[in-house]
Amino acid sequence: MAKTSERAQRGGHSGISIEDVAVAAGVSTATVSRALRGLPRVSESTRTKILIAAKDLGYVPSSSAAGLATGKTRTIGVLAPYVDRWFFGKVIDGVERELHSHGYNLSLFNLGGRGGAPRERLFSRAMVQKQIDALVLLATFLNPGEIEELQDIEMPVVSVGGAVPGLSTIGVDDREVSRTAARHLRDLGHRRIAMLHGIGEVQQQFTVPDFRATDFENALREMGIEPEPRWTFRAEFTVEGGVTAARAFAAQSGPKPTAIMCASDEMALGVLFEAQRLGIRVPEELSVVGIDGHEMGAAVGLTTVWQDPAAQGQRATQMLLAALGGDDSAVHSEYAEHRLIARETTAPPAV
Amino acid sequence: MAKTSERAQRGGHSGISIEDVAVAAGVSTATVSRALRGLPRVSESTRTKILIAAKDLGYVPSSSAAGLATGKTRTIGVLAPYVDRWFFGKVIDGVERELHSHGYNLSLFNLGGRGGAPRERLFSRAMVQKQIDALVLLATFLNPGEIEELQDIEMPVVSVGGAVPGLSTIGVDDREVSRTAARHLRDLGHRRIAMLHGIGEVQQQFTVPDFRATDFENALREMGIEPEPRWTFRAEFTVEGGVTAARAFAAQSGPKPTAIMCASDEMALGVLFEAQRLGIRVPEELSVVGIDGHEMGAAVGLTTVWQDPAAQGQRATQMLLAALGGDDSAVHSEYAEHRLIARETTAPPAV
DNA sequence: GTGAAAGCGCTAACAT
DNA sequence: ATGTTAGCGCTTTCAC
């Protein structure tokens, strides 16, 4: 009965509206709306009739119109300082999967960490409000004013991979992660342990796992090892950062540590690479342990404390979705799993 | 005069509408609309008056309402098979930067390449239509029917990093890239050259730089070197792929090649790592060259043919934006720059 | 330069 | 079970 292809409206856009479907199916737009959204109070016969008509016409509902009518956009935002870094890519991937399987869209906002003039702060009510229904914060710092704004407009938010005061957070338990790494080293017999911490980027803009610094130190102290300031390094959370640190490490005179714990696998990899260049043998002369579970680490045999950022993103999204579904207690802080993966870059210290 | 904070409407949402601004400024909504969008035919005095009122009220326009009225969403979509891989992350980053600096939003669609049940094909008119104004295709295959649909609804599209028949593409000139790598090896004196190609993933779903395979071979032939099938390997575009290939390579008996060209840096890194494990010295016994310019490559001294995916994403976005601005000739295929970066993994072959 | 009014396409009471 | 009727908040002729 219905022509398979009924496009070619007079205008520019491909304007097949709910009205067209209603007419074609011989019902009202209200019924079409219900039928298409799977709402009750529609007889099976008319529902099928409508479904067929909609399909025949190639009808696609206008998200703008629906959004205007409902006040919901069915889009959730992800605010990230980077998208081209391991952790962030993984989390975004996890968020995306969960979202699309529920018919939601993902809107990506990049804070633009890297070079160039510091871009105007992207977080603003303008960015957020009336554009998205909920927000995932990726290791991003928000100041009290911004948090208050979010609360004012009652937007569900959860932070992933970086605690933000006043917001629910999904992420590994950094204290335990540090302990896991430290214990592994201690159990192997290490006592002279160096640490490589990450440093924040643009000041105050991002929440950095800076606490891993203190967590590392505390973990050592708990085992009766007093952290040695000379063996405490800081660098960027990147391979380059690790390379730099390894150089500084090697340049030092005096007694050397037998192991180093790095705040991320990328840094650990940098240390590894530069160590090799410098002729420092791993693990014979130096044991190296990272944090993350980066694929590249597996390839080089890096010992690490593994975590699953994609799962964290997914979990955060589930909470947000539940909150949007009316479950007010859905959003809450939660620890994500972590696990030691001992590989080839750690071994007992040479005596 | 105006109270700084005038929220606390009665309802649930933070409903400050254009109407409120109009009233506050003592003008009509039409004028507010013009003023706020910087349109002409508004006196400077009233414009400032409106700007102030809007700011005081904390007014944020509803993108849904605007979208409904104009038919434009000011959002462009990015369809990618992965977001957590080097190339893709970089491109998305480039797209995002260009977009937000023009007040556009980025909607991310992930085809979900990896594990699990093959998710329902996400590309559908439903996904695309009425949700975004233009589309960036990331190394993603589209079948003729899908392309036709896009053309029917007149949506500007550009593919990045993978040619799609019938669509404009931004990306490096793969033939030249291959030649660059091959020439470098030849100039060093290599004649026995192995190749590591990438393989596609989910069949027919993604456009993979599979042509690099033939490009590599052609490049060799142009230099009078007949590619040796025994030295032609195929693996996934990942570090693991490179590791696997290196093992296969090492397991072979008979004469060995003196160099290997890899279709990506990640693969090349895998080869490097596994070579080291196997005791194959690079570059003394084996020269390795990759393609991409991956940061990790710099850290290990990998020779590569560099490219800039972020710039490609940015360029694609510029075209799309121009097209949306009415420039019909804006979208077209264009080659992106590439350049040899000779580092430490290539050297003349041992005699 | 500014305003009035008619939609844009959908959803959500409220009727029937 | 289905239809009627208002809007949702903005843009856009078309008057003035």
Image (tube, coloured by chain):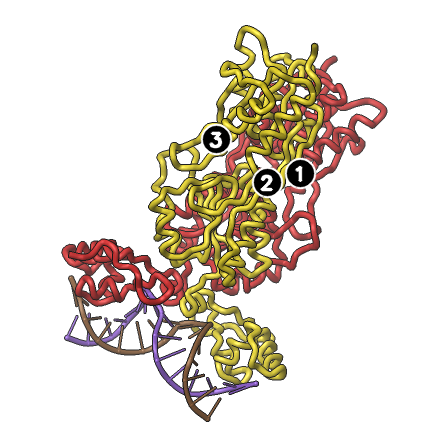
Chain colours: A red, B yellow, C purple, D brown
Q: Nearer the viewer, mark 3 or mark 2?
A: 3
Examine the image and state in which quarter residue B256 appears.
top right
Examine the image and state in which quarter residue B153 appears.
bottom left
Q: Position of residue B68 (x, y in %)?
A: 40, 67
Task: Work out whether residue B238 or residue A134 is closer to the camera in this orientation and state it.
Answer: B238
Q: How far, Cα to Cα, is label 1 from label 2?
A: 10 Å
Task: Work out whether residue A231 or residue B208 is closer to the camera in this orientation and state it.
Answer: B208
Q: Which residue is mark 1?
A: A237
Say whether residue A66 is left or right of residue B33.
Answer: left
Task: Work out whether residue B350 or residue A288 is closer to the camera in this orientation and state it.
Answer: B350
Q: How far, Cα to Cα, is label 3 from label 2?
A: 26 Å
Badge 2 amino acid: Arg
Q: Position of residue D3 (x, y in %)?
A: 18, 71
Query: Label 2 marks which chain's residue?
Result: A
Can residue B155 be seen in the rendering of this structure? yes
Alpha-carbon neighbours of circle 3 within 10 Å: few (<14), some, or many (≥20)? some
Can residue A301 be seen in the rendering of this structure? no
Residue A51: assigned label:
none
Badge 1 amino acid: Phe
Badge 3 amino acid: Asp
Say whether residue B297 is left or right of residue A128.
Answer: right
Q: Which is nearer the N-term, disc 1 or disc 2?
A: 2
Which quadrant: the N terminus of chain A?
bottom left
Q: Which residue is mark 3?
A: B210
Q: Secondary structure at mark 2?
A: loop
In the rendered view, tell whether residue A115 sits above or below residue C12.
above
Q: Residue shown at 61%/17% (left/top)?
A: B275
Q: Residue shown at 75%/32% (left/top)?
A: A245
